Image (cartoon, grey):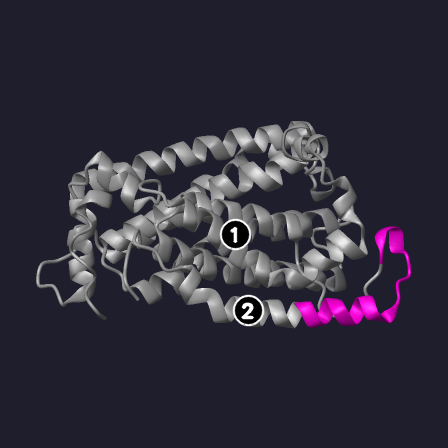
Amino acid sequence: MPALPIDIYHRGSRLLDTLKSYYAKEAEAPPPISPRTALLSSLAFTALYVAPFYLSPTLRSTSPAHRDAPSVIRARIRSVTLACAASLFLTAYLLTTHAHATPRDLLRLWGLWPLSLTDTLRLPALVALLFAGPLFKSLLAEGAWRSLTPSALKADLWTSWTGYRNLIAAPVSEELVFRSLVISLHLAARVPPTRIVFTTPLVFGAAHLHHLAANLRACTPAGSAAPPLRLALQCVAVSLFQLGYTSAFGFFAAFALLRTGNLPAVVLVHGFCNAMGVPQFWGRVEGGDGEELGVEWTVAYYALLVAGAGGFWALLWAWTESGNALVAF
């Protein structure tokens, strides 16, 4: 791995410079935080994040069908806020006590400072290119462009509790805990960058497995101990798909944070992906309200889907290159 430039103190921190030197050459001294401590802390963050869903009477008794109720969303946001605060405190304690991190070091390792406006805009643009097909389908085929008004956007982000949860609360909290804090500990433990990219998102994906228990409970008939086998298998299949999808996004998000050192950009990408959902990979493209469209719409959609994926891959390294990178690959 090539060494990074050493003239980055003005935009970084002494601790990060030291850690980068260990990634660039073999180090003799042990890391300030062991990889085991980093992993156990990450699992503790997951427990803190998920535990309220089982300890809170309001959240524990809520079925998946009622998860969009405003009272449930508010309760979840309160519990997640406390989990974020506890995880932030624990991470700061470990980094300041064992790695002797300064406040400046913490901001740098967490991807909060310094920030490049170019990175903040370029990373979402890269992901928008990946979603060229779904954007075409949503905006043009389904006519969603008509609702892109300031009042409608305000309603989706602030007035609607569901929109606030999906587009603001969830991206901010999940990226802070499972990306920023988890990765900073693994950096302090000198875990290789590639391993960070492909292992830390599994913690994030595992945090979503608690939905399996809720779905199984919702499918269980009254008076029965377990749901029918067919429904149970469906729940497992859905949960495995969610695990795979969230882990795949996590691989990219971890890679992007390490490459740009820009947490807000990753949060924007997360919110965008939540808004877009899972792309359509088969079937004919329909208009709004199931309106039947000509076959040319379907051809254009799948052509853009493939072209967008190709463009994303071609520009991945160039558009994630930044002088604020946390490590070098």
Q: Position of residue 213 (x, y in %)?
A: 61, 50
Q: Quadrant of residue 72?
A: top right
Q: Is residue 281 above or below residue 175?
A: below
Q: Which residue is mark 1?
A: 124
Choose between 129 and 234: the one closer to the eye.
129
Please give left or right for residue 41 compared with residue 104 in the image: right
Q: Residue at x 68, y 50 (%)?
A: 215
Disc 2 vs disc 1: Cβ atoms closer than 8 Å? no
Q: Is residue 232 visible?
A: no
- The answer to whether residue 70 is magenta is no
Residue with the mark numbered 2: 311
Q: Looking at the image, is mark 2 or mark 1 earlier in the sequence?
A: 1
Q: Position of residue 109 (x, y in %)?
A: 29, 46
Name the spot of residue 328 as percent of width and height, x first.
28, 63
Magenta span: helix, strand or loop, mainly? Answer: helix
Quarter of the C terminus within the rendering: bottom left
Residue 101, position as x, y percentages in the image = 19, 40
- Stretch of the chain drawn in magenta: 287-304
> Where is residue 150, by image quadrant?
top right
Q: Amino acid at mark 2?
A: Gly
Q: CA distance from mark 2 to mark 1?
A: 14 Å
> Crowding near pointer 2: few (<14 within 10 Å), some, many (20+)?
some
The three-letter amino acid code for the residue at tag 1 is: Pro
Residue at 33% from the left image edge and 44% from the top image edge = 110
From the viewer's perspective, is 61 left or right of 191? right
**Label 2: element kind:** helix
